[in-house]
Image (tube, grey):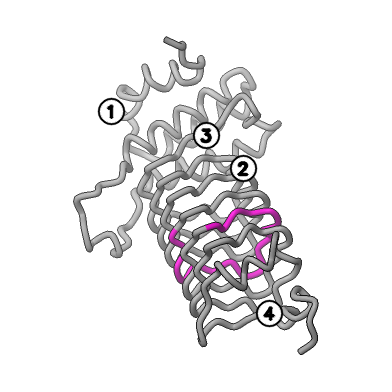
Amino acid sequence: MARPSHGKVYASSGTARFHKYFDTRWTTYALERIARESERDRWSIVDLLAAFIRDSRPIDETIGPQVDLVPKIPRDVQSALVVIGRLVQINDVLSERRYLDLEDTDLRGADLSRLSFPGVRFTGAWLDSASLRETNLERANFLHAKLKMADLTGANLHLADFEATNAQDADFSEATSDGANLKDTQCQGADFHDASIDGVMLAGTHFEGADLRNTRGVPHMFPILLTRVFVDERTQLPGNIYEWMQLKP
């Protein structure tokens, strides 16, 4: 059996005790101060905070229709998210050998705006109505996540993976989505106006009622749009669609 990384051992052994006493935001900020001063402890603290969030906000599949109700996220969880998003910006805390795991967490209504979560795994997470304005989400993984009515205005979504994500009525306006994967993504009613979508993968994407006006760049394999991307009479198509199709209006 492969042994877990040092960070995972630290998080696993310390999470229970940490969770017991982790009842105020000030503990989070004290850990942030330690992490800023100690390069050796920085990753372990970030990993521990992520473990705390996973333990505190697991997805509850039994809530049924109430999933559309956005609860108030606990202050300690919100503080942990903020601290992670700030610490990750320091000296490339995340690397090819380290990844931050926030999979299958209930983060509905969380405020991650103007923070940094590059390459973070949000697989299966619930981020409905979350604020991700101007957030660095480069290479983040949202496979099968829920982003209904999430605000991603101006976010860095370069090479992010949204395959099979539910992003209905989400706001992607002015976001940089170059190279992102939107295959089989539910984007009904989503707002992409003034977004950069150069090289975006679009096969099977649902754009019914979406706003694609003034998008910049050419989607990857754009001819697929004619056969596998779903639009309707409410979809607002970009003005340069004829340029993409190499046709004249």
Callout 3 crowding tier (Cα within 10 Å): few <14, some 14–19, many ≥20: many
> Which numbered disc flags the more N-terminal residue, 3 or 4?
3
Separation of residues labelled 3 and 4 (CA atoms): 36 Å
Q: Which portion, as a residue range, is magenta? A: 166-183
> Which numbered disc flags the more N-terminal residue, 4 or 1?
1
Which residue carries the number 2 mark?
118
Callout 4 crowding tier (Cα within 10 Å): few <14, some 14–19, many ≥20: some
Q: Above or below — where is 83 with respect to 39?
A: below
Q: Quadrant of the C terminus?
A: bottom right
Callout 1 crowding tier (Cα within 10 Å): few <14, some 14–19, many ≥20: few
Q: Quadrant of the N terminus?
A: top left
Which residue carries the number 1 mark?
20
Q: Above or below — where is 35 with respect to 89?
A: above
Is 172 included in the stretch rendered in magenta? Answer: yes
Which residue carries the number 3 mark?
100
Tell me which corner region of the image, top left, top right, bottom left or bottom right, holds residue 10.
Answer: top left
> Which numbered disc flags the more N-terminal residue, 4 or 2?
2
Mark 2 residue type: Pro
Separation of residues labelled 1 and 2 (CA atoms): 29 Å
Which of 149 and 143 lies nearest the eye of the viewer? 143
Judged by depth in the image, the label closer to the viewer, 4 or 1, is 4
Q: Is residue 248 left or right of residue 65?
A: right
Separation of residues labelled 4 and 2 (CA atoms): 29 Å
Rendered location of residue 215, percent (x, y):
70, 73
Mark 1 residue type: Lys
Q: Secondary structure at mark 2?
A: loop
Mark 4 residue type: Pro
Give the residue displayed 52% in from the left and 73% down from the top.
Answer: 230
Disc number placed over residue 238 in the picture, else none: 4
